[in-house]
């Protein structure tokens, strides 16, 4: 092998300029395509600055092609991924490919470039009604709240509304409620929105019923209040409106009296049904069969009562009576008094029996009189009307 003298040291002699083996050129730069004169294919070029070696592989059209033969950092012999270990070349080539589903790699030989891109669209931000979420370290959290549960499995995320929804509050600041909307805040449900008059409808489905768990249910509409007492004594009672919505029918246990009192100086009436337990008499002492509610100051009470009595001793004697009676409690009088004379229609097989109406301790009382030596069984069904007087 011979060396070409360096141009910087013209007197230096490094040997003959042989054809084979190839010549070795030392320079402080890398070879260029214009470095073709005086060089032969196979010559080697050493860049003493970068410590890289090149070999001349082509001379054509006054153009030299010098390939990098060795780099100062060493040749690339393997590629290593996240897992699987180092990959060595085969036929001086290592394939760099995507999975074809999420990642794709496109090569451009003319520019010696490999372009790696995601297949399809991948979101890097998730706008919401309030704020935007961005993944962190490739992870995006999808969380629920007290009424929503999220679950994840395989490649699916489920967002489920809890069967029992607990509403803490709804803000109406943003956006403004629309007409005929509903506002739920804390334990209050109220009509909202921009309309002047908004109603609230609660409708049960099929044979279902609307039930409250508290003992007292209060319904407020247009500032008038109706309160239904469902305490233990009246828990089986029911209230029914007729088709016109103006008549209340009361049904339920025995000995239940339902009362409606108008507000302030207003007037009003209510019908209520009272079915008493049986009362037995064995002599001719007047015995209380049933009675109205206690009449309070400013009230007028009118009763209509159907009385039936049967002698279980004879098995053939009976008494029927229909009683109308009214009593009023004037504040100035200090107690309830009868208004007029009670009207009693009596139909009996034994005139020794009797049915009377009177006021006892501010209560309209129905009394029955039997026969000494006989057992009589009495029942009554009474309707009471209460009006407020001023």
Image (cartoon, rainbow, N blue to C red):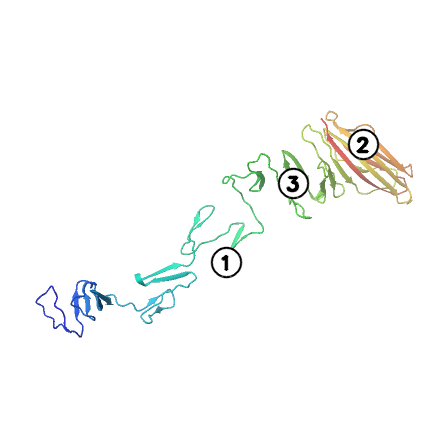
Q: Residue at x 58, y 41 (%)?
A: 189
- Local crowd at mark 2 within 10 Å, few (<14), some, or many (≥20)? many
Can residue 286 be seen from the camera position used here?
no
Front-most of 380 and 97? Answer: 97
Q: Badges 1 and 3: C-beta atoms under 8 Å apart? A: no
- Residue 322, image x, y percentages: 84, 36
**Res. 61 mark:** none
Q: Secondary structure at mark 1?
A: strand
**Res. 325 mark:** 2
- Local crowd at mark 1 within 10 Å, few (<14), some, or many (≥20)? few
Can residue 324 be seen from the camera position used here?
yes
- The alpha-carbon separation of the residues under discs 2 and 3 comes to 33 Å
* Residue occupied by mark 1: 156
* Residue occupied by mark 3: 217
Q: Earlier in the sequence, mark 1 or mark 3?
A: 1
Q: Earlier in the sequence, mark 2 or mark 3?
A: 3
Q: Secondary structure at mark 3?
A: strand
- The alpha-carbon separation of the residues under discs 2 and 1 comes to 77 Å
Q: Residue furthest top?
A: 332
- Residue 315, image x, y percentages: 90, 45
Question: Going by the image, does 216 lie left or right of 118?
Answer: right
Nearer mark to the viewer, of 2 and 1: 1
Q: Residue furthest front?
A: 61
Front-most of 361 and 299? Answer: 299
- Residue 332, image x, y percentages: 73, 24
Quadrant into which the C terminus falls:
top right
- The alpha-carbon separation of the residues under discs 1 and 3 comes to 46 Å
Q: How many numbered marks appear?
A: 3
Q: Badges 2 and 1: C-beta atoms under 8 Å apart? A: no
- Residue 85, image x, y percentages: 36, 68
User: In the rendered image, which quarter is residue 51 located in?
Assistant: bottom left
């Amino acid at each position: 092998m011979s060396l070409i003298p360096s141009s910087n040291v013209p007197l230096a002699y490094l040997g003959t300029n042989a054809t084979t083996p190839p010549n070795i050129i030392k320079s402080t730069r890398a070879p260029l395509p214009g470095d073709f004169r005086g060089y032969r294919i196979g010559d080697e070029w050493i860049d003493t600055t970068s410590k890289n070696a090149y070999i001349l592989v082509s001379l054509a059209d006054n153009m030299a092609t010098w390939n990098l033969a060795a780099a100062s950092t060493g040749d690339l012999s393997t590629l290593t991924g996240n897992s699987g270990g180092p990959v060595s070349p085969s036929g001086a080539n290592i394939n760099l490919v995507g999975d074809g589903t999420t990642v794709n790699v496109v090569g451009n030989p003319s520019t010696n470039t490999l372009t790696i891109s995601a297949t399809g669209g991948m979101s890097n931000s998730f706008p919401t009604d309030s704020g935007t979420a961005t993944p962190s370290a490739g992870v995006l959290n999808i969380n629920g709240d007290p009424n929503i549960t999220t679950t994840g499995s395989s490649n699916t995320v489920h967002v489920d509304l809890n069967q029992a929804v607990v509403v803490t509050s709804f803000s109406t600041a943003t956006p403004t409620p629309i007409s005929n909307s509903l506002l739920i805040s804390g334990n209050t449900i109220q009509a909202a929105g921009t309309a002047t008059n908004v109603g609230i409808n609660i409708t049960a489905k099929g044979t279902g019923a609307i039930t409250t768990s508290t003992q007292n249910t209060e319904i407020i509409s247009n500032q008038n209040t109706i309160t239904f007492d469902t305490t233990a004594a009246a828990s089986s009672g029911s209230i029914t409106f007729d088709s016109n919505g103006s008549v209340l029918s009361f049904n339920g246990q025995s000995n239940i009296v339902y009362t409606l009192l108008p507000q302030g100086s207003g007037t009003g009436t209510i019908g209520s049904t009272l079915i008493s337990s049986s009362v037995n008499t064995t002599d001719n002492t007047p015995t209380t069969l049933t009675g109205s509610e206690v009449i309070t100051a400013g009230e007028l009470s009118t009763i209509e009562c159907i009385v039936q009595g049967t002698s279980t001793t004879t098995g053939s004697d009976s008494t029927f009576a229909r009683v109308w009676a009214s009593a009023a409690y004037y504040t100035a009088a200090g107690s309830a008094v009868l208004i007029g004379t009670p009207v009693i229609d009596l139909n009996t097989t034994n005139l020794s029996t009797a049915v009377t109406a009177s006021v006892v301790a501010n209560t309209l009382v129905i009394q029955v009189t039997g026969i000494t030596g006989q057992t009589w069984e009495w029942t009554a069904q009474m309707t009471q009307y209460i009006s407020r007087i001023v």
